[in-house]
Amino acid sequence: MRALTILLLAICCTSQAARILGIFPYNSHSHFNMYEVLMKELVNRGHHVTVLSHFPQKTKYINYIDLSVNGSLPAVTNNVSMELISSLNSVTSFFDIIGDTLNMCEKVLQHPNTKKLTSSKEEYDLILIEVFGAECFFGLLHKIKAPSVSLTSSVMLPWANARFGNPDNPAYIPNYFLPLTYRMTFSQRLINTMFKVWLCAMFYYYSDYRSQQIARRYLGEELPGLSDLARNSSLILVNSHFSINQPRPLVPGVVEVGGLHIKSPGKIEEGLEKFLNESKHGLIYFSLGSMVRSETMSATTLEAILDAFSELPQNFLWKVDGDLLPRLPSNVRAGKWLPQLEILAHPNTLAFITHGGLMGLQEALYFGVPMVGIPLFSDQELNIQNLSPKVAVSLDYKTLTKASLLQALNTVINDQSRVHSSERNDEPYIEPYAELRGEH
Ligand SMILES: *[C@@H]1O[C@H](CO)[C@@H](O)[C@H](O)[C@H]1NC(C)=O
Ligand SMILES: *[C@@H]1O[C@H](CO)[C@@H](O)[C@H](O)[C@H]1NC(C)=O
Ligand SMILES: *[C@@H]1O[C@H](CO)[C@@H](O)[C@H](O)[C@H]1NC(C)=O
Ligand SMILES: *[C@@H]1O[C@H](CO)[C@@H](O)[C@H](O)[C@H]1NC(C)=O
């Protein structure tokens, strides 16, 4: 009898399952990170998901069907050099995204798995679709009719505000591409306003005109305007939170889900865990994110960084190809890939040297790890500015020296107000820096 009741309960509860389609055409792993966590959680809650992305599951995940478009675009994961980064600024960053967008539109729409999606008779109850540089793919919503929810792994994007009728006043809301905070001077507000007008004009030209042309080629001449399709989205989930980004008015259709991607830490490989456990003076984790190859920094900068590291008693973990470094001091370990979340969650981790990518920054905040920010491109400078000076110390990559790095690290390590874990307050590592602190 009990077994029958359980069986009946099981049947009644699984009947709520929805078929959900995720469309994530942008080929950056950090963006996908957030969408993957969300899609898997939907599966865990009984739904069936189909995911169009560049990052298929490595091992089979039940009720999660991959429509992989991997290979349609050049990889950016661990494939961006510092030379390329140095050529970027607010304006070129924007054109870079636009260029990527148009290329992505063409390459992903012609992929066999995208065609399979548009020609299949499969029906969906809901579509989740990325808005970051993915205008074109709103065209798919004309082929596959279902209510849609937009997603972005960044803060609210300038061009998405109008779609949801969300207020975006440039007098106090800094543009995504500008390193300004809400405490703007008059001239900064003026620049912010002019930039917003220019950006929206450029965006409409490229989105409504260029993307539209490409999308019509693949999805049919009768395709309605992409921005009309985008405007039909019921909701947008944005990766911001008023506590770390700025407080701003939001209409009910714009929902902040900052930090949604943060999972509970998993197991660390034993050798690495031992290194973390044995870092009695604490550990400092250094990563410039999933895209940038740290080893492409100039020889002088690499030397400055290694010199600074070798002068400190802490251990260091650096996401870098160690074979390509000039040398590796005994307190530094390198890895081409490191379990970032688990490292940040480890009680011995004292600080995080970061490029200021939103995902890693949210993880560090979640585990209470203070940061030294070396912003490189896109929204990174804005992200660091938002946490500066209390949670993060900002360093300029172009003028980075051994002394400036040491000073920033010492500030972050020694300032008691930044140390999160109460049990750390008794550790002797605080003391040896007294005279260094006096120097600066
Ligand atoms: C994408 O495909 C390439 C081979 O073309 C492979 O090396 C890579 O691991 C794949 N990436 C993913 C995330 O599956
Ligand atoms: C790395 O980027 C370069 C330049 O965009 C590209 O030509 C190359 O194919 C990329 N590498 C991979 C493995 O996709
Ligand atoms: C807008 O979305 C609804 C589902 O939420 C759909 O029925 C309708 O056809 C869509 N409108 C357009 C113009 O695609
Ligand atoms: C590291 O320390 C934790 C907590 O003390 C312990 O549970 C774990 O077994 C240690 N791991 C290694 C490899 O020493």
Image (cartoon, rainbow, N blue to C red):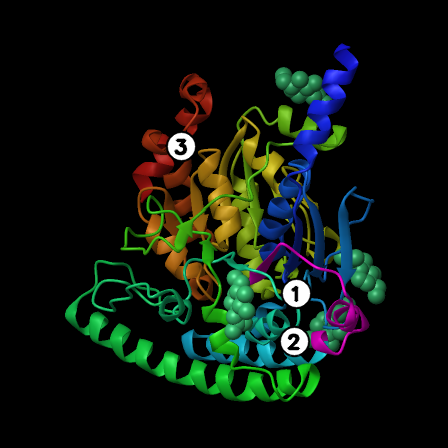
Mark 2 crowd level (few <14, some 14–19, many ≥20, 10 Å Cα): many
In this view, 343 is above or below 158: above
List the residue tagged with mark 1.
27
Find numbered disc 1 in the image and state the secondary structure of the residue it sits on.
loop
Residue lying at 59% horizontally and 89% vertically, measured from the top left: 213
Depth order, front residue of 94/118: 118
Q: Earlier in the sequence, mark 1 or mark 3?
A: 1
Span colored in magenta: 108-133
Q: Quadrant of residue 276?
A: top right
Q: Could you tell me the amino acid type at mark 3?
A: Tyr
Image location of residue 21, percent across then percent down:
66, 57
Contact (CB < 8 A) between labels 1 and 2? yes
Q: CA distance from mark 1 to mark 2?
A: 9 Å
Looking at the image, which residue sits at the far top?
1
Q: Is residue 109 magenta?
A: yes
List the residue tagged with mark 2.
104
Mark 1 crowd level (few <14, some 14–19, many ≥20, 10 Å Cα): many
Image location of residue 150, percent across then percent down:
51, 60
Residue 430 visible in rendering: yes
Residue lying at 74% horizontally and 70% vertically, measured from the top left: 114
Q: Which quadrant of the rendered structure holds the N terminus?
A: top right
Depth order, front residue of 353/164: 164
Q: Quadrant of residue 204?
A: bottom left
Image location of residue 195, percent across then percent down:
32, 78
